[in-house]
Amino acid sequence: MFGLDALVAGSARLRPENLAICSHGERDGDSVKYAELDLAIGAFVARLRAFDLTPGARILLCCPARAEAIIAITAIIASGFEAVLAPLRLHSRL
């Protein structure tokens, strides 16, 4: 079985310079290439593992819907944890 993290890793190997995420159009906003996305997910996975959490632990994610959210969700799932998304406006109150 393949997850989103495997899809990103495969795309990074085959097409590292292709655009993976574009939040606001190609000319302004978040633009992330597959190679950058794969590296960012790997770094986030390493940080999560350093917390020594129990497999299957729930992690509350409070962030706007941007490239960083996709990186975080993918890394959380790849690490064997469950991503729990905060209500839409909660992140602005923190």
Image (cartoon, rainbow, N blue to C red):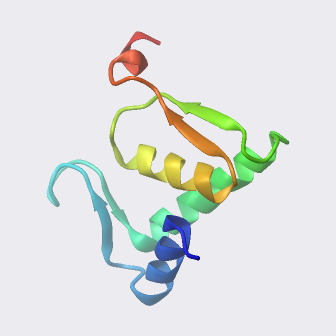
Image position of 80 (left or right of 51) = left
Image position of 60 (left or right of 15) = right
Image position of 34 (left or right of 78) = left
Judge whether 14 appears above or below 18 on screen: below
Question: Residue 7's spot in the image, x, y percent?
Answer: 48, 75
Image position of 56 (left or right of 13) = right
* Image quarter in which the N terminus is found: bottom right
Furthest toward the top, the residue is: 93
Furthest toward the front, the residue is: 1
What residue do we see at 45% from left, 26% from top?
86
Question: Residue 25's spot in the image, x, y percent?
Answer: 15, 55
What residue do we see at 32% from left, 77% from top?
18
What residue do we see at 23% from left, 48% from top?
29
Q: Quadrant of residue 46?
A: bottom right
Question: Residue 54's spot in the image, x, y percent?
Answer: 82, 42
Count of residue discs: 0
Q: Quadrant of residue 39?
A: bottom right
Furthest toward the bottom, the residue is: 14
Judge whether 8 appears above or below 13 on screen: above
Q: Nearer the viewer, residue 9 or 27?
A: 9
Q: Nearer the viewer, residue 31 or 1?
A: 1
